[in-house]
Amino acid sequence: MNGHPGGAEHSLRMLELSGLTPGCRVLDMGAGAGETVELLRSRGYEAVGIDIEPRGINVERGDMLHTGYASGSFDAVISQCAFYVSGDVPGAFRESARVLRSGGILMLSDVVYEPVVPAAEAAGFEILHREDMTDVWREYYIAAIWAGTADCRCGREKCGYELLVCRKK
């Protein structure tokens, strides 16, 4: 799996940091080809993936800004390299908070151009873990450029990559 920096190892690390136990219901927002959904299911989680352009059998067509799921439907949300692409990072935080039960966990890693903690807190999250992963992202992105698979829609000069694990208050 290499749909995001760090691959499966990074997804497993996020899961470890979250403290979630198998059996939890997890929504992968921006699931792409569904590798993380498959990984979560193999570990005993009830995982569902949505993406605006699904590329795998484990992923349903869906918009992370308007998922269509009932409020409080999930124990956790995971999203890797997708909030920024949504075009509305604060909106993605709000929708994550809406679909999570009280005390639910958001696991996020993404490109950042401005501080994301204020958007997370405004949506009702407390930050449990925050980590700068810019160096890992740079390696991933340079490899993608060389492979001809890079898709940079930013048009900005400087960015970073952060991992957040948050709890819905």
Image: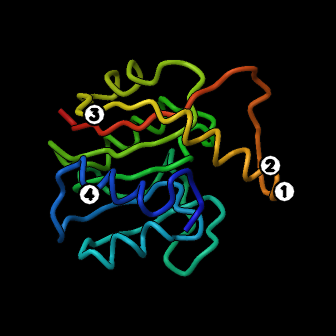
Residue at 34 percent across and 70 percent down: it is 40
Name the residue type under label 3.
Answer: His
Vertically, is 106 above or below 128? below
Chain-order first, disc 3 or disc 2: 3
The answer to the question of whether label 1 and label 3 lie on touching residues, with beta carbons closer than 8 A, is no
Chain-order first, disc 1 or disc 4: 4
Q: Nearer the viewer, residue 91 or 44?
A: 44
Which quadrant of the figure contains the C terminus?
top left
Name the residue type under label 1.
Answer: Gly
Residue at 33 percent across and 53 percent down: it is 13
What's the CA distance linking mark 2 and mark 4? 35 Å
The answer to the question of whether label 1 and label 4 lie on touching residues, with beta carbons closer than 8 A, is no
Q: For mark 1, give the secondary structure.
A: loop
The answer to the question of whether label 2 and label 4 lie on touching residues, with beta carbons closer than 8 A, is no
Residue at 45 percent across and 50 percent down: it is 79
The answer to the question of whether label 1 and label 2 lie on touching residues, with beta carbons closer than 8 A, is yes
Residue at 81 percent across and 59 percent down: it is 147
* 151 left or right, relative to 66: right
Q: Which residue in the structure is indicated by mark 2? A: 145
Q: For mark 3, give the secondary structure.
A: strand
Q: Which residue in the structure is indicated by mark 4? A: 74
What's the CA distance linking mark 1 and mark 4? 36 Å
Q: Which mark is residue 129?
A: 3
What's the CA distance linking mark 4 and mark 3? 20 Å
From the image, state whether disc 2 or disc 4 is nearer to you: 2
Q: Which residue in the structure is indicated by mark 1? A: 148
Q: For mark 4, give the secondary structure.
A: strand
Q: For mark 2, give the secondary structure.
A: helix
Chain-order first, disc 2 or disc 4: 4
What's the CA distance linking mark 1 and mark 3? 33 Å
Mark 4 nearby-residue class (10 Å; few <14, some 14–19, many ≥20) = many
x, y percentage for residue 48?
39, 69
